[in-house]
């Protein structure tokens, strides 16, 4: 495949490494130094594009790439308040778009474990629930997109919690997400259920960016030639 990279920071470079190992070709690299090359003509050279930037630029990048008709994979977080607009855009333009808050195969298995555990714990309100996420200091948004996904999965299955908050809270209806930024952490997420008699905890710890990069490349391979809105559940056939 021929791939375009929109965002060429540490994550973009790791995606490039994995893509080349899988015998793909990188035909375009866009970062803050060459925005003028982000054109329909240049993107037309690619079979798919992968967008990893930040909350400040992701939405405009996604909208622009979709307007050019290229199948797009996006892993940027912090802009999801505009996702419904993008879904509508994909439908109107008969485009192809795949979004994931986390592309790691391990994290997506972790998502499934989280949903199952949340359902099992729902009848037991004596357990308090807390989420903790740790990332490197260069991560711009907090809480992480992965932590938000985990929280929303719990809220869908546990009526004792009404909302998630990114702080300590004395309100029993709040699901706390505690965010820490520590170098050189690649990403750790934990969900802990605590009672007076015991604790139950599940944890996922990333050791490097390579797991995220591999998942993003697998997503690009999956979306090539397709139309519609997809997630990693489609890629992994969950």
Image: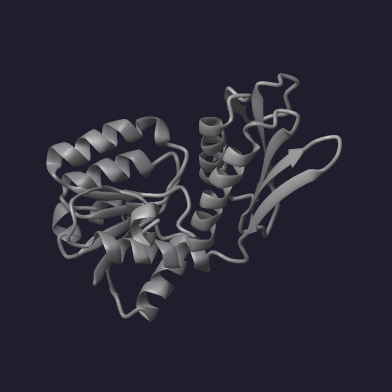
Up the image or down, 181 lies above or below 1; here it is: above
Q: Nearer the viewer, residue 87 or 159?
A: 159
Which residue is rendered at x = 56% and y = 54% of the image?
110
Q: Is residue 29 visible?
A: no
Quadrant in which the C terminus is drawn: bottom left
Q: Is residue 48 visible?
A: yes
Tell me which corner region of the image, top left, top right, bottom left or bottom right, holds residue 226.
bottom left
Which residue is rendered at x = 69% and y = 29% of the image?
167
Up the image or down, 153 lies above or below 235; here it is: above
Q: Position of residue 207 (x, y in %)?
A: 62, 66
Tell me which corner region of the image, top left, top right, bottom left or bottom right, holds residue 120.
top right
Q: Position of residue 212 (x, y in %)?
A: 48, 61
Question: Image check: 157 left or right of 198?
Answer: left
Q: Nearer the viewer, residue 20 or 221?
A: 221
Q: Position of residue 22 (x, y in %)?
A: 35, 78
Question: Image check: 234 left or right of 208?
Answer: left
Q: Nearer the viewer, residue 12 or 157?
A: 157
Which residue is rendered at x = 33% and y = 55% of the image?
234
């Amino acid at each position: 495949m021929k791939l375009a990279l929109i965002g060429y920071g540490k994550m973009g470079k790791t995606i490039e490494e994995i893509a080349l190992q899988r015998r793909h070709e990188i035909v375009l690299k866009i970062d803050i130094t060459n925005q003028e090359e982000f054109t329909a003509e240049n993107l037309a050279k690619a079979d798919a594009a992968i967008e990893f930037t930040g909350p400040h630029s992701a939405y405009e990048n996604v909208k622009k790439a979709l307007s050019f008709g290229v199948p797009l994979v996006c892993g940027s977080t912090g802009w999801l308040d505009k996702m419904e607009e993008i879904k509508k855009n994909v439908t109107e333009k008969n485009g192809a778009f795949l979004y994931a808050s986390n592309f790691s195969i391990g994290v997506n298995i972790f998502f499934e474990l989280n949903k199952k555990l949340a359902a099992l714990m729902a009848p037991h309100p004596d357990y308090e629930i807390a989420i903790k996420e740790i990332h490197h200091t260069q991560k711009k948004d907090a809480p992480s997109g992965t932590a938000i996904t985990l929280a929303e999965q719990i809220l869908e299955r546990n009526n004792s919690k009404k909302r998630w908050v990114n702080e300590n809270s004395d309100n029993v209806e709040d699901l706390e997400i505690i965010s820490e930024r520590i170098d050189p952490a690649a990403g750790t997420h934990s969900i802990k259920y605590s009672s007076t008699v015991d604790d139950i905890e599940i944890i996922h710890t990333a050791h490097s960016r390579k797991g995220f990069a591999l998942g993003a490349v697998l997503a690009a391979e999956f979306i090539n030639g397709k139309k519609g809105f997809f997630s990693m559940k489609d890629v992994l056939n969950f």
